DNA sequence: CGCCGGCTGCGGCAATACGTCGCACCCCCG
DNA sequence: CGGGGGTGCGACGTATTGCCGCAGCCGGCG
């Protein structure tokens, strides 16, 4: 809204979750970025080579190649690119790798657009509306459970195993809350 | 390992847990390192300035200054120093910080000497352990807490408020978990 | 067809974690 | 010096888990 349309910084968003992409992409556009989207490393690579973006948001776990190799590519194309890694499968090992490969930040989903922009280090345009309530642990847990449940096609037993929690407990949690914080 | 015996590489070990130090120190010596030990950042700094070590193993959470500042110091003294960070309170946030400050690897305790030595040799590779296991809810919670705690400069009361949880509960969680998943 | 293995919902019970309050101690600031 | 805020920790009643077992339902397979 207060950004000269011709001066928007370019941003490459790569995630295989299309709905997540469209939501985030819109949010980032509203914050003054010229967003291009790719749904896989393979799609993103030519885009990046064509015109290296100034910013990038990359999901790690995607069908096809891992986002890690894309980090390297982007970083080699332009070391000044600010790369935020975003993943639902956060782990210390991949975080370490990502940073060593040149990522600027490593965030665990769910992360909202403000957090991502903040991770870039600064807002390109308007003064940042610092800052919101961090989500409560309950909320976070709920989001996470939903994501994993989804990945397991709604299979509660499998989800419980993956989450290393008891099936009974999962059931109770699921039954109890449509919590909205 | 493939080092001339008369020219053992120097290694600085910093951890405030003295028994842990002595055990690890012995193990590292057996593997061919000339180990010097410090029990705090304050003690380690002059040692490092005196003769910058080729390798370093640093605990993050120590009484006194955080190991993070020591990473910076060591890295500035000699960017070639290979620094492994070792902590019982591992979190993604601190891992990211550590790597950005120049650490070579970041390991969660418990880690044995072999893992540590292996970490020295670890190159920034894109040979990735694509990880297919969602973090447990506990892990997630831990990460989240660490992040918010960090945002509040370690202020436990403020963090508890932000997380909408009781200070007492937060204390207990912080005290109890070296969760390693 | 019966049988087996896996998923689901649920009751119950003991173990554990949590919320809450209180107290002591620190440090900083007016 | 008093007050406000932070920290650590014990205690105790209550809520939440972990973990059993049971019954029902589905889908594959000999």
Image (tube, coloured by chain):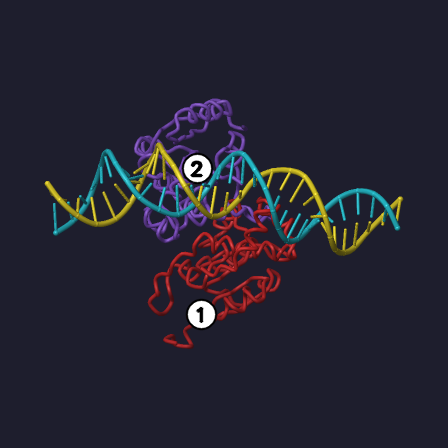
Chain colours: A red, B purple, C cyan, D yellow
10 Å crowding of disc 2: few (<14), some (14-19), many (20+): few
| Residue assigned mark 2 | B176
Question: To which chain does the residue with label 2 belong?
Answer: B
Q: Nearer the viewer, residue B135 or B86?
A: B135
Q: What x and y, as percent, mark residue B84? A: 45, 37
Q: Position of residue A99 (x, y in %)?
A: 47, 50
Q: Same chain for marks 2 and 1?
A: no
From this view, report whether residue B143 is shown above or below residue B41.
below
Kindly identify which numbered label has been placed on residue A33: 1
Q: What is the C-alpha distance between the residues marked 2 and 1?
A: 43 Å
Location of residue A25 with respect to A162 vertically, above or below = below
Left or right: A169, with A82 as reference point:
right
Q: Position of residue B119 (x, y in %)?
A: 51, 37
Residue located at (46% from left, 57% from top): A79
Is residue A131 something one can see in this rendering? Answer: yes
Q: Position of residue A49 (x, y in %)?
A: 55, 64
Q: Secondary structure at mark 2?
A: helix
Report whether B27 appears left or right of A2. Answer: right
Instruction: Return the chain for callout 1.
Output: A
Q: Name the residue nearer the viewer: B153 or B45.
A: B153
Q: Quadrant of the N terminus of chain B?
A: top right
Could you tell me which residue is drawn at 45 percent across and 62 percent down?
Answer: A112
From the viewer's perspective, is the residue at label 2 or at label 1 nearer?
2
- Specify whether A89 is left or right of A2: right
Q: Which mark is residue B12?
A: none
């Amino acid at each position: 809204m207060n950004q000269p349309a011709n001066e928007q910084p370019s941003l490459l968003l790569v995630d295989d979750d299309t709905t997540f992409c469209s939501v985030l992409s819109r949010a980032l556009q509203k914050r003054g970025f010229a967003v291009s989207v790719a749904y896989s490393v393979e799609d993103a690579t030519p885009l990046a080579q064509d015109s290296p973006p100034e910013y990038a948001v990359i999901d790690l776990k995607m069908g096809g190649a891992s986002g890690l190799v894309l980090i390297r590519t982007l970083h080699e194309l332009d070391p000044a690119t600010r790369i935020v890694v975003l993943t639902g499968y956060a782990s210390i090992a991949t975080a370490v790798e990502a940073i060593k490969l040149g990522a600027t930040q490593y965030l665990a989903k769910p992360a909202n657009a403000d957090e991502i922009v903040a991770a870039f280090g600064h807002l390109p345009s308007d003064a940042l509306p610092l800052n919101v309530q961090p989500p409560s642990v309950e909320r976070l847990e709920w989001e996470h459970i939903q994501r994993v449940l989804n990945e397991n096609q709604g299979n509660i037993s499998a989800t419980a195993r993956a989450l290393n929690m008891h099936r009974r407990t999962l059931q109770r949690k699921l039954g109890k809350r449509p919590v909205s914080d």
